[in-house]
Structure formats: structure tokens, C-alpha cells
Image (tube, rainbow, N blue to C red):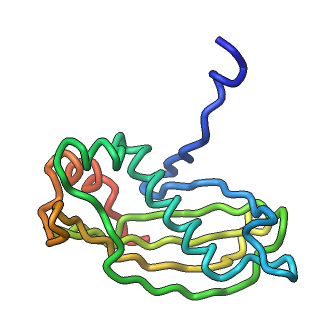
Amino acid sequence: MTVAQSLTPTSGVLHGRVHVLPVRVYYEDTDAGGVVYYANYLKFAERGRTELLRTLGIEQQKLRDETGVIFMMYEGDVKYRRPARLDDALTVETAVVQLGAASVKMRQVIRHSGSHEEMAIFNAHVACTGPDGKPARIPDSVREALGSFVSDA
């Protein structure tokens, strides 16, 4: 096995009922002033939700191929607390706060790794949809995996 074959991107770790994903701020994430462009916090949050699922054994492409269902943002709100800057190390903390028949509500906090300051807080309402784009029940295997991580974080 080569070094390249043994390296894989991190999916983060579970700390109790919260998934934590490390993220580094790169030049491409910033504006002309070296501050993270506001929309990129949403990308960091999306990665956090995706990697939570992956950590629980749910790969979204495989889920789509096998069941036809996908997860998509239904609604969300974000509060920007402090600016992150070029080269900052951040963590994306993701917690499942409510599990419905066809949707999941998650709370995400993006923190500065060193100071633990909140950089942004995101509440995401994610819908499960079928191939036709209409709401679909969350598959039992996904419900079981997510259900054990519902918290009031």
C-alpha cells in the first residue's frame, strides 16, 4: 500500500451525541480581506451534516442508488457571531435535534478550534425526498441510525 492509498479525508468524530468535523480556512474560502465569505459557512455546515451521516454508516450516494431518496435543505437560519480568517482551524459541531417522518432538524455550531468561540450557528431543517422531489419517509435504517443521536444540543 502506498502512502496516498492509506490517506483518506476525515469524517470527523462523535463526541457523545454531537458530531465534530475539523475544517481549515483556505484562501478560496475568504474574501479580499482574508475573512471567510459568509456563504462558505453554509458549505462548512453541509460538510458537517454529510460527514455525520457518513460516520453513522450512511453514504448519501449509496442511499440514493438503493432507495431513490435524497436529503435536501428545506429551510435554515444562520447567525454569524465572529469572523473566521485565512488559516484558522475550525470545528463544525452537528447535533440532530428532531427527527420527523420525512425530515430532520439539526443544530450546527462552527467554532474556532483554539478559542472555542462560536463563529456561526446554523439551524437546518433537512427534508427527505423521493426521485420526484416530493417528501418521502426516512428509510428505517437511516431513522434507526439518526434516532440514537437525537439530542437537545
Identity of the residue furthest to the front in this view: 132
Residue at (41% x, 83% y) in the render = 76
Quadrant in the picture for the C terminus: bottom left
The quarter of the image holding the N terminus is top right
Residue 91 x/y as whole percent: 65, 61
Taking 120 as reference, is 144 above or below it? Answer: above
Query: Which residue is painted at 14% across and 72% down in the image?
Result: 134
Position of 146 compared to 82: left or right? left
Counting from the top left corner in percent of width and height, residue 49 is at 45, 60
In the image shown, does 57 or 146 lie closer to the viewer? Answer: 57
Give the residue at x 56% y 47%.
12
Q: Quadrant of residue 97?
A: bottom left
Query: Is 145 situated above or below 99?
Result: above
Q: Is residue 28 above or below residue 124?
A: above
Q: Nearer the viewer, residue 17 or 9?
A: 9
Question: In the image, residue 80 lies at what x, y percent?
Answer: 63, 86
> Residue 6, located in which quarter of the rendered image?
top right
Give the left or right position of residue 108, taking residue 103 as reference.
right
Q: Which residue ends up furthest to the top in the rendered image?
A: 1
The residue nearer to you, when weighing 143 against 61, is 61
Q: Is residue 89 left or right of residue 137?
A: right
- Residue 73 is left or right of residue 142, and the answer is right
Q: Nearer the viewer, residue 42 or 95?
A: 42
Residue name at image x 56 percent, y 68 percent: 43
Give the image quarter of residue 99. Answer: bottom left
